[in-house]
């Protein structure tokens, strides 16, 4: 048993975008040693199978469909670790990117529970890889901004759209399917070029993956075209449109995308 996983320790582990081959070797080792695994709904069976000795506990946590609230999850983690069990909290993507990791770190700290983080490949990186795109581009995209398009129930999505429209870089927007029309509208209204390249990626790294490319003023059309109510990441910026950034069979020609307001 590795010295970094004694009894009563909690590891917050990134499961990556879904493909088990994209899981880190450290994450695989921690899963093999775990005695209990609290996992998100987006974690696949192939990855869960890497924890053969562990009790597997689903805690839901899919956008808009949470089987357990965060305080309940925190309590389960603390209770298991307090009994001296080796605990893995397994999250899709990277735990530190919209993964509610701060709450779980705080809960462990308040109860004197040793806790550590094992990073994973985040969806934006996997989407760029699947689309053969770069997230940065010399001279055009020198910054990368991560955003969530998911707001609390009853709350409006609030971002500094003026600053985002002026930013010379790539926007990586998580959980962006439902908000795609308003995202495009707000960015264009704030001055972002309607022809800015965009990429829409669904189920990245999985056999059901789809990646489509177009322009900002056709973003809602792209989201409708991709036709899957599954985890979606939006990439917006010049780097996405760099020559050779997506294979021909995954490309929607710009000429084929309606550009009239009715389709936006």
Image: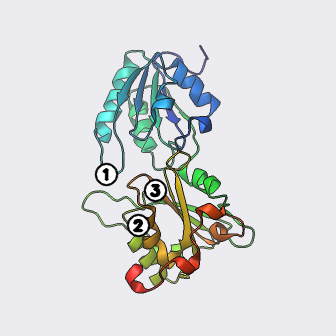
* Total residue callouts: 3
Residue placed under numbered mark 1 in the picture:
64
Q: Is residue 162 visible?
A: no
Quote the CA–CA distance across marks 1 and 2. Answer: 19 Å
The residue lying toward the viewer, choosing from 41 and 72, is 41
The residue lying toward the viewer, choosing from 135 and 252, is 252
From the image, state whether disc 3 or disc 1 is nearer to you: 3
Q: Which mark identifies residue 25? A: none
**Mark 3 crowdedness (10 Å alpha carbons): few <14, some 14-19, many ≥20:** many
- Image quadrant occupied by the C terminus: bottom left
Residue 173 x %, y %: 49, 61
Which residue is at a point 37% across and 15% down the rendered structure image? 83
Q: Which mark identifies residue 224? A: 2
Residue placed under numbered mark 3 in the picture:
232
Identity of the residue furthest to the bottom in this view:
260
Which residue is at a point 61% across and 17% down the rendered structure image? 3
Mark 1 or 2 closer to N-term?
1
In terms of secondary structure, where does tag 1 sit?
loop
Quote the CA–CA distance across marks 2 and 3. Answer: 12 Å
């Amino acid at each position: 048993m590795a010295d970094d996983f004694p009894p009563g320790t909690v590891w917050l582990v990134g499961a990556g975008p879904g493909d088990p081959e994209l899981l880190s070797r450290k994450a695989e080792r921690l899963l093999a040693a775990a005695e209990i695994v609290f996992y998100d709904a987006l974690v696949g069976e192939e990855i869960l199978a890497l924890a053969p000795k562990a009790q597997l506990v689903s805690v839901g946590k899919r956008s808009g469909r949470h089987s357990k609230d965060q305080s309940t999850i925190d309590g389960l983690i603390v209770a298991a670790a307090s009994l001296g069990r080796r605990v893995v909290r397994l999250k899709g993507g990277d735990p530190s990117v919209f993964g509610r990791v701060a709450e779980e770190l705080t809960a462990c700290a308040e109860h004197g529970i040793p806790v550590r983080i094992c990073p994973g490949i985040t969806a934006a990186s996997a989407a760029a890889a699947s689309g053969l795109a770069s997230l940065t581009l010399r001279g055009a995209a020198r910054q990368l901004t991560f955003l969530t398009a998911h707001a609390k129930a009853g709350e409006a999505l609030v971002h500094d759209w003026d600053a985002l429209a002026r930013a010379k870089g790539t926007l990586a927007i998580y959980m962006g399917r439902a908000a795609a029309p308003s995202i495009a509208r707000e960015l264009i209204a704030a001055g972002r070029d309607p022809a800015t390249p965009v990429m829409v990626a669904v189920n990245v790294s999985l056999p059901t993956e789809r990646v489509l490319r177009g322009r900002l003023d056709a973003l809602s059309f792209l989201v409708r075209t991709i036709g899957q109510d599954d985890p979606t990441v939006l990439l917006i910026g010049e780097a996405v449109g760099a020559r050779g950034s997506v294979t021909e069979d995954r490309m929607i020609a710009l000429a084929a995308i309606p550009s009239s307001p009715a389709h936006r």
